[in-house]
Amino acid sequence: MNRLSDRIDPTASDTLRILTDLVGMPTAVPPGDNYEEIVDYLMPKFADLGFEVEKVCIPEDIFKQKMKNPELHGKRANLHAYLDVCADRTLVIYTHLDVVPVGDGWTFPPYEGTIADGKFYARGSADSKAAVAALLTALTQIRELGITPAYNLNIALTTDEEIGPYSGLCYFADIGLLSGDYFLCMDGEGDDVIIGTNGILTWRVDVFGRTYHSGSSFLGVNALEKSVAMMNGMLALKSEVEDRRSEMPSSHVVADKTGFLNVKPILNITMIESGVKENVVPGICTIRGDRRVIPEETFDTAIEEIERALANAAGAGADTRYEFTYELGYPPMYTDASHPWIGQVQTVANEVSDRKIGIAGAQGSLDVAYVIGITGQPVCCHGVGRVLESRAHAEDENVRIEDLVRYTKFLGLLLTE
Ligand SMILES: [Zn+2]
């Protein structure tokens, strides 16, 4: 295994060459119209490594029905690659090929890939194309050394993670392409091994009133003013909800910065819409927000709590008329930290790293949770970048070249130990 690790050391330039090609194909979503190009680039690379490869396009009718987003166009082309080495166990390896749009404020050209101060800068470098480049290098070195991987490898490189809700990965799960014994998600940062995520639901409350001339506003019902009590009800629930803690520890990076030692549930009011003019009593006010549920909670109880809080708030004023609706997003997911797969990933991650890689849960929500809801595999996420440094989704997104090498070794050892 030292042989493999030593061989990977001088391969940074190979990985960087592939990464430069990958970031040069703008797969920003919306619109996500270059997926076929990147899949066509990757297919022969996996085929040369002995994989059975398949381009899997989401049928247009399914895509339209699940996504309902007019900003999206182009083929939803995904890559599925399978290597059967007759091992007892199969490992599913996943990350996404799409990136978020470039945005403003870049020092470096976002789609070229610039090396400066030991880092590689480009949109999608850390999130999440570096992992794809590292995977190809690790697999190449494993093959050149004639080592047989310890698992059959079931690889999914898919679309629309950054926009959701129905990513290519969700489609793979629905058509049964993700069978295997363990699941490694290469998306995310390399500061921790992530064993769980919060689930997400989005909610909306329409508060109804009656429009009137503002000079005689006492003859109408002001929906905006009525909604204040509703929001206060939500804020009271918010402090109750956010006092809870999951047993999942927070990322040490988050803990150091915020003092939150464990992942917590969240309730946010994030949007409000009402009124057409200063002198018109608004007849409707729409409030929206989201709720992040920890794995110990359920969507059902989270919804009941909100319904109760709203009913109390509406009754407390002069009987406010309102309608509460919600949409379920990705569920929470959680794999016990004592599971051997988690131990294996954490051990290898620490073997190749000079900083301590801990176990943590994530505050955010992931499409992987949708998959695990179907397949039930033990799962963890461990990626290339750094939470506080890589600037994923921001300007000057970057990855340290030393982290690229570290991650290539991590994959090399994990797949062969
Ligand atoms: Zn990502």
Image (cartoon, rainbow, N blue to C red):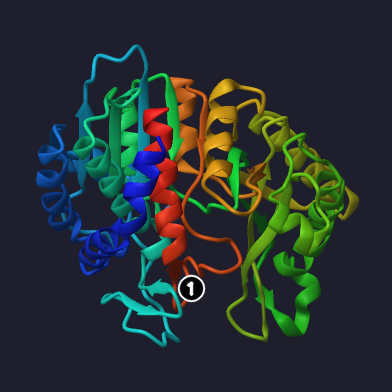
Compared to 52, does 289 lie above or below? Answer: below
Image coordinates for residue 169, horizontal then vertical, percent: 34, 38
Residue 193, located in which quarter of the rendered image? top right
| Residue identifier under label 1 | 394
- 196 left or right, relative to 9: right
In this image, 416 relative to 345: left or right? left
Q: Residue at x 13, y 32 (%)?
A: 50
Give the amino acid type for the residue marked by disc 1 in the picture: Ala
Q: Nearer the viewer, residue 392 or 314?
A: 392
In this rendering, the answer to whether 20 lies above or below 249 is below
Residue 137 percent location from the top left of the image: 27, 49
Ligand 1 is in which quadrant of the figure? bottom left
Specify the farthest residue to the top. Answer: 88
Q: Position of residue 2 (x, y in %)?
A: 41, 39
Q: Position of residue 413 (x, y in %)?
A: 42, 36
Tell me which corner region of the image, top left, top right, bottom left or bottom right, holds residue 150.
top left
